[in-house]
């Protein structure tokens, strides 16, 4: 594969830069396969400035590496359709990695890695035979449908050979996008029912799991779901179904936010009416009743249950003091920083970690991948999330630790077990050597006689 090889050593890690056979990309890979990155290749020979850029790229790749991964970081660029994409396959010790495709114009490699790690922990905590991955297409998800399809199909062809990655829907992508990918490479979950899939966003698999996690968590903070006040930060494919399922359990939606603003009504919001309005392409602030506030104002609404279901890092050390709730159930991936979770813990606000609470979607995808039905998927989601939420919160209450610390410990233990080499096979059982022919002759002369005849 190599016409030109350069080696760089830093902190005992070695990165090998190899020129690909087609001269179109450069593969950066470590001898231990901690990470692999595909980037556009500079025409050789490289200038000093270009070499310095590659050196910085090498160093930036390894800032994510630890004993769990990532196994592979891939940057994809296709100039004609204008595709820029990132794929991180974090860990495949438990099996092929399942992870959604996020479409947004401002996603970074760091964000994709953190999301991939969250998927690794999520799949392990749920006991699924899958590792974790995540991908992102840097584009506006509201592109014209034909342009979006072109990008999705180009991305699918680019990852066809990365068979350890099974794509699924995520923010900005849906069942139709998965159908395009399935058509291109025959490998996706979250497919439309017309082609044998379980449309996890359409049925609200993640939102259903959030409602189960909320029900269990409410018992740990003396909260009665009947009449409890609910705020959804990110009233999209996850948030709207969480509101729907929790509404069936008696919770009252008093606040909802999307990219255009925040709706607040202390008397309650009609969830079905708001979902219908959002399905028509409108914003929560187009709801006829209630106060219309700024997008970030959702964090200021006093409530009993606060569910972040949008982007990462929406609650940080600089704004967590504004949060006025008893319980946070994380519907988005990594919506709180570690500092924010610690502050909530110190304030006796219970926070159920993302990869425990929002695992419903990937559990559904894993069931679909093995040919299961929607009924089986909902039963599996309820069983796993009910068990894991109780397990984590009981241990956190007993030890005084953050729920995330307990959950990470649980997940990492399962991952390390899968990564451990199998024990050597037991030695064969000991059998005494067969008797010598002389022994047979001396003890059984008539046998010899019979054999001769």
Image (tube, rainbow, N blue to C red):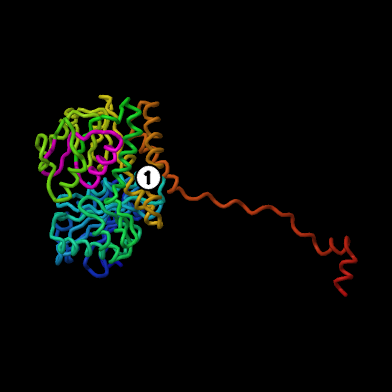
**Which of the pair 305/109 is nearer the observer?**
305
Mark 1 residue crowding within 10 angstroms, few (<14) / some (14–19) / many (20+): many
Residue 195 falls in image quadrant: bottom left
Q: Position of residue 332 (x, y in %)?
A: 25, 42
Instruction: Say whether residue 387 is magenta.
Output: no
- Determine whether, in the image, residue 299 is placed left or right of residue 63: left
Residue 168 position within the rendered picture, expressed as x and y whole percent measured from the top left: 29, 55
Q: In the rendered image, which quarter is residue 275 located in?
A: top left
At horizontal 18% and vertical 47% (from top left) the residue drawn is: 276
For image coordinates 22% across by 57% down, the residue present is 75
**Is 253 part of what is drawn in magenta?**
yes
Residue 398 at x, y = what percent? 40, 26
* Residue bearing the label numbered 1: 381
Tell me which segment is drawn in magenta: 234-263
Residue 388 lies left or right of residue 159; in this view the side is: right
The N terminus: image quadrant: bottom left
Q: Nearer the viewer, residue 33 or 128?
A: 128
Q: Quadrant of residue 449?
A: bottom right
Nearer-the-camera pick, 362 or 106 = 362
């Amino acid at each position: 594969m190599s016409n030109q090889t350069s080696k760089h050593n830093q902190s005992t890690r070695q990165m090998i830069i190899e020129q690909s056979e087609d001269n179109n990309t450069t593969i950066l890979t470590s001898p231990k396969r901690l990470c692999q990155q595909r980037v556009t290749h500079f025409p050789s020979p490289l200038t000093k400035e270009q070499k310095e850029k590659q050196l910085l790229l090498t160093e930036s790749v390894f800032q994510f590496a630890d004993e769990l991964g990532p196994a592979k970081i891939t940057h994809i660029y296709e100039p004609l359709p204008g595709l820029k994409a990132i794929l991180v396959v974090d860990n495949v010790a438990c099996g092929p990695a399942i992870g959604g495709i996020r479409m947004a114009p401002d996603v970074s490699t760091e964000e994709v890695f953190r999301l991939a790690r969250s998927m690794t922990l999520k799949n392990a905590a749920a006991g699924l035979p899958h590792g974790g991955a995540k991908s992102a297409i840097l584009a506006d998800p509201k592109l014209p449908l034909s342009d979006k399809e072109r990008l999705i199909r180009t991305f699918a062809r680019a990852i066809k050979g990365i068979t350890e990655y099974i794509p699924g829907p995520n923010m900005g992508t849906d069942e139709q996008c998965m159908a395009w990918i399935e058509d291109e490479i025959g490998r996706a979950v979250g497919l439309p029912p017309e082609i044998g899939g379980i449309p996890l966003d359409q049925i609200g698999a993640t939102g259903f799991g959030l409602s189960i996690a909320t029900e269990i968590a409410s018992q740990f903070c003396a909260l009665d779901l009947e009449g409890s006040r609910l705020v959804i930060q990110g009233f999209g494919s996850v948030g709207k179904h969480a509101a729907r399922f929790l509404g069936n359990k008696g919770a009252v939606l008093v606040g909802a936010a999307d990219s255009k603003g925040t709706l607040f009504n202390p008397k309650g919001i009609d969830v079905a009416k708001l979902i219908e309005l959002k399905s028509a392409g409108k914003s929560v602030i187009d709801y006829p009743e209630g106060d219309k506030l700024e997008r970030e104002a959702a964090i200021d609404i006093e409530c009993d249950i606060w569910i972040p279901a949008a982007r990462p890092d929406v609650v940080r050390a600089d704004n967590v003091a504004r949060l006025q709730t008893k319980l946070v159930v994380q519907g988005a991936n990594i919506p709180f920083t570690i500092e924010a979770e610690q502050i909530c813990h110190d304030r006796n606000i219970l926070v159920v970690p993302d990869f425990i609470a929002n695992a419903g979607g990937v559990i559904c995808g894993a069931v679909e991948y093995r040919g299961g039905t929607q009924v089986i998927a909902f039963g599996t989601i309820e069983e796993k999330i009910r068990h894991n939420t109780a397990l984590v919160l009981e241990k956190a209450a007993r030890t005084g630790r953050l729920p995330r610390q307990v959950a990470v410990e649980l997940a990492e233990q399962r991952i390390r077990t899968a990564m451990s080499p199998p024990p050597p096979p037991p030695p064969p059982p000991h059998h005494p050597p067969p008797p010598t022919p002389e022994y047979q002759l001396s003890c059984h002369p008539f046998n010899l006689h019979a054999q001769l005849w």
